[in-house]
Amino acid sequence: MTSEITYAEVSFKKESKPSDTKSKPPAAPKENTNLHKSYPSFLTLLLASVLILQLLLAISFFIAFIIFFQKYSALLKEKKTLKELTHTAMECVQENLTIEEKDWSCCPKNWKPFGSNCYFISTVVKNWTESEKNCLGMKAHLLVINSKDEQDFITKNLYTQHAYFIGLSDPEGKHQWQWVDQTQYSQSVTFWHSGEPSNPEEGCVLLNFRSYSRSWGWNDIPCHEQQMSLCKMRKIYL
Ligand code: MMA
């Protein structure tokens, strides 16, 4: 409605080129009087401003693209570093005090050193497969027990009311026990509770405390059961 009125006013006061009228934006009648006097310069100004605006827009887009690209590549780099560095902090001790062999042995922060390995008590409750995945995610395996000393060391750090998955399972249900790291299962290095393993349906092993025998030992349970777990990895030597 307003633009129709404006158009009528312009054509009434002065003959103007029809093509120009079309591109002219609707303006207040007061401004119109000045408009027709400086009309060519106004158009040039308009064109120039549009061009400048487009240029500014192009520059801003370019700058935004550069910033985005830089941020994105920095993010990618950080992600890669994080992937390589699963552990944010390491705790190292100097083990060999001879001058020639100043070896630093390290375990990730919150892991416990024993012998040439590091141990982690995972309090997240998961089934056996997910527990092993959790250890793998930390460049470790579920605990493989190689000696009574090792078992005694770890159990000193555990709660007697909790049970923890270890890296022993019977994938085929034939009581052919396998350690997750391919260590040979040796009957002479086993710490089953009396009466265990008890059931071919129970293919995964946990370490728990039995109050009636007042001892820590192994018990087979169904693999889908959710339990806490223990992880083990080799120490890192620097
Ligand atoms: C539970 C379960 C078994 C274990 C028996 C021992 C009732 O089942 O933990 O794996 O063999 O207890 O009594």
Image: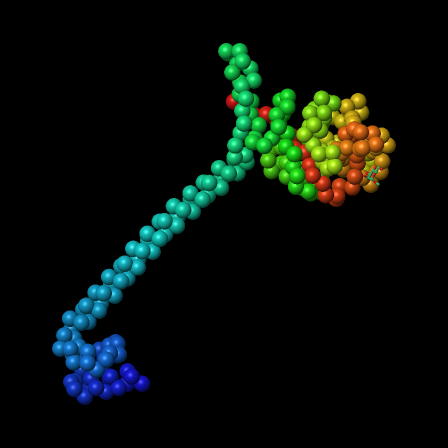
Q: Residue at x 14, y 74 (%)?
A: 38
Judged from this view, the residue extending furthest toward the left is 37
Report if residue 191 is visible in the image: yes
Q: Is residue 23 placed above or below 214 in the rendered structure?
A: below
Q: Is residue 86 left or right of residue 161?
A: left
Name the foreground residue: 41 vs 206.
206
Report if residue 141 is visible in the image: no
Q: Is residue 71 left or right of residue 79?
A: left
Q: Position of residue 115 (x, y in %)?
A: 64, 21
Q: Residue at x 72, y 25 (%)?
A: 152
Name the foreground residue: 185 vs 125.
125
Splitting the image into 4 quarters, where does residue 1 fall? bottom left
Q: Position of residue 32 (x, y in %)?
A: 19, 80
Q: How many numbered circles does the render carry?
A: 0
Q: Position of residue 153 (x, y in %)?
A: 69, 25
Quadrant for ligand 1 reads: top right
Judged from this view, the residue extending furthest toward the top is 99
Q: Residue at x 54, y 13 (%)?
A: 97
Splitting the image into 4 quarters, where does residue 155 fall? top right
Display coloring: rainbow
Splitting the image into 4 quarters, where does residue 222 fall? top right
Judged from this view, the residue extending furthest toward the right is 195
Q: Position of residue 14 (x, y in %)?
A: 15, 85
Q: Is residue 58 left or right of residue 69?
A: left
Q: Residue at x 43, y 47 (%)?
A: 72
Q: Is residue 53 left or right of residue 41?
A: right
